[in-house]
Image (cartoon, rainbow, N blue to C red):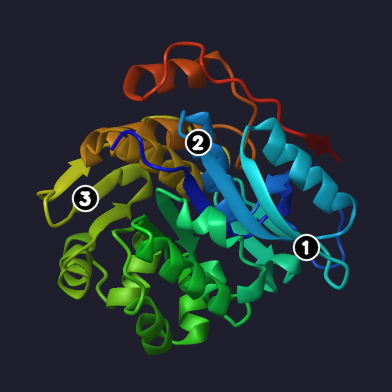
Amino acid sequence: MAGRGPLVSLGDLAWDVLAKPDTILQPGGDTTGRMELLGGGSAANLAVWARRAGYPSTFVGKIGRDRFGELATADLEAEGVQAELTLSSQHRTGVILALIDQRGQRAMLTGQGADWELLPEELPREVLTGAGHLHLTAWSLFRDPPRAAALEAARLAKAAGATLSLDPGSFQMIQQMGRENFLEIVDNIPFDIIFPNDDEARAMSHESDPERAMTWLRQRYPNALVVLKLDEEGALLDGPTQPRTRVSATRDHLLDATGAGDSFGGAFLAGWLAHGDAVRAAELGAQVGGWVVSRFGARPPADDELRARLASVGILAPGAVSTAPVAATL
């Protein structure tokens, strides 16, 4: 797959407010805990992780003309991600609150900022027609705008020869939107890869068993590679040219699950776009995802362990990762 254009990830760029209380939160009570402000947004996270894994990436989205927007842009630039941004004076840069429990699982509250307001006429068409791959998250599909912009981006990129991937985004949002409404939209997107997690696959298929959910997804989308993310159970792969295969998760201790799926997806796409081997790409995704969940936030600063993992199963030479993310501890 050498020689193709960059990975373009379209959607949400926001700031994550991460909060992990030391004790249970009680109405009217006060407690201590860990809080941080870090770059976030599912689509932006995926672009960062693809770039960290060695594949050129571009983020397309909309932010506010505010201080958070400036910091978010600087964060992407520090990571080596090209930012193609529409600036809004009417909408603030998005903020996402992630409440993390003692087990490391997170519940998220997403503010509807500028990232929800992208319009088709604001798309950078030359960037999209020059993409080798376009990634969309369902956060761009749950309402309109930005749905029309996401669908137009998919049409432009696909017509120009790009491959396309989709992350279903949120089982709760699928339920709120209505399963049939969601499937009607997704059925009309010509994606080559879909990245559901266990909850999203269940919401889409109404199958509680991952194997049966995979069978449903393969029958519904026969031309797509399905990469089913199963947390500590690893990932299940099945596609037109890929026999059903399970890739094991790492044994990393779960501290914070924020960004686990985005980091897996970004690393997977970096590998798959570089060499076309889905199993190797999933092994890279598992290594990166395991490293992420053992740390705090969706984009922890790179260290020697991450570099070693990328070099062992990735597309980089040892020591090739260099990042300097912007972060603020509250």
Point out which mark residue 26 bears. Answer: 1
Of badges 2 and 3, the one in the foreground is 2
Q: Quadrant of residue 154?
A: bottom left
Marks 2/3: CA distance? 24 Å
Q: Which residue is painted at 89% across and 56% down in the image?
A: 66
The one nearer the camera, 40 or 23, is 40
Decide which of tag 2 and tag 1 comes sooner along the chain: 1
Name the element at disc 2.
Answer: loop
State which mark lies toward you, 2 or 1. 2
In the rendered image, which quarter is residue 90 located in?
bottom right
Give the mark nearest the N terminus, 3 or 1: 1
* Residue 43 picture location, percent across and down: 56, 54
Residue 14, position as x, y percentages in the image: 71, 55
Provide the secondary structure element on which disc 1 rests. Answer: loop
As shown in the figure, which amino acid type bears the numbered disc 2? Pro
Furthest-top residue in this view: 318
Tell me the distance, in whole angstroms, between the alpha carbons under discs 3 and 1.
42 Å
Query: What is the three-letter code of the residue carrying label 1?
Result: Gln
Residue 268 in percent (x, y) is at 37, 41
Q: Image check: 295 left or right of 307?
A: right
Q: Label 3: few (<14), some or many (≥20) within 10 Å?
A: many
Q: Secondary structure at mark 3?
A: strand
Residue at image coords 42%, 88% = 181
Residue at the spot of label 2: 56
Q: Where's residue 113, x and y in %?
A: 75, 68
Q: Which residue is mark 3?
A: 237
Q: CA distance from mark 2 to mark 1?
A: 45 Å
